[in-house]
Amino acid sequence: MLANLEMVKALLDGAERVVVLTGSGVSAESGIPTFREADGLWRQFRAEELARPDAFAEDPELVWEFYNWRRELVANSEPNDAHLALADLECVVPEFLLITQNVDGLHSLAGSRNLLEMHGSLWELQCTMCSWRNEDRTMLSGVPTCPACGALLRPGVVWFGEALPPGVLNQAIRAIAEADVFLSVGTSAMVQPAASFAQLAREQGAVTVEINLEPTPNSGLVDFALHGKAGTILPRLTGALCA
Ligand code: APR
């Protein structure tokens, strides 16, 4: 692991174009449960059972209760060393894109700027009927309704089975095609299309690195798989570069 860590550090040192993909594991050390691990349960529900359009159609109160709980949890959390290391890395790499599946906003709070939130944001509200959409960081209770038309509002996040926001996938694919180094951090690589980004990056000539607590389906195909906490590994990779 130490030798691999040194090699990845050297790679990043010389890289002109870096793309990073993050998942919920990057926020775990901020106290935010991941999606598929045991602590991802809210009451008896898995996040996957509630983060879906049919769950919202059936019981908007329950789904909003879940999101209001998550909004409060995130509002009381702070970026951790992994978020901060990625914000530092952006400062030293000429072309850098951070693609995140997370909706918590902690990357931008840590200072990341060139950021693609491919699954939207917990802090966006969007009307289920009209085009009203707005950022709202206040704590909500119950089910909010649209100030323009009175219909139910929903969180501005991409749910299971829904399309990504327009243009997002193309932007990610274009950046991956040009990357020298692709890092995947804190994601189980179970959800498409992000799960295929490592393979795509490899096919397009990037050196690929996975940083995750445990092996994933991508561990065998990446050039370097570093297993451990993102908040420990990332600062060790970026510390000297960004000093
Ligand atoms: N450092 C690094 N990795 C970690 C850490 C940590 N401190 N803690 C947990 N992990 C790893 C876990 O081992 C797991 O493999 O993070 C991964 C989290 O995986 P998931 O819970 O599946 O989350 P994610 O990959 O982000 O899910 C993708 O699925 O439910 C949808 O839209 C939702 O964006 C989400 C997407």
Image (spheres, rainbow, N blue to C red):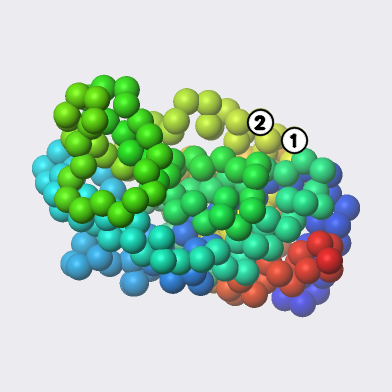
What amino acid type is highlighted by mark number 1? Glu
Q: Residue at x 17, y 50 (%)?
A: 142
Up the image or down, 76 lies above or below 228; here it is above
Crowd rating for badge 2 (residues with CA inside 10 Å; few <14, some 14–19, many 20+): few
SS type, badge 2: helix
Question: Is residue 148 or residue 195 the one in the foreground?
Answer: 148
Question: Is residue 169 or residue 78 the one in the foreground?
Answer: 78
How far across and down, in percent of the image, does residue 210 sit?
Answer: 63, 60
What amino acid type is highlighted by mark number 2? Arg
Q: Residue at x 57, y 68 (%)?
A: 80
- In which quadrant of the rendered image does the C terminus lie? bottom right
Crowd rating for badge 1 (residues with CA inside 10 Å; few <14, some 14–19, many 20+): some
How far across and down, in percent of the image, does residue 61 sit?
Answer: 14, 49
Image-quadrant location for residue 147 = top left
Question: Is residue 150 or residue 36 the one in the foreground?
Answer: 150
For label 1, the residue is 178
Left or right: 27, with 48 as reference point: right
SS type, badge 1: helix
Residue 174, numbered label: 2
Question: Is residue 140 or residue 198 the one in the foreground?
Answer: 140
Q: Residue at x 18, y 45 (%)?
A: 143
Left or right: 237, with 109 as reference point: right
Left or right: 76, with 234 as reference point: left
Left or right: 138, with 26 as reference point: left
Q: Residue at x 35, y 31 (%)?
A: 133
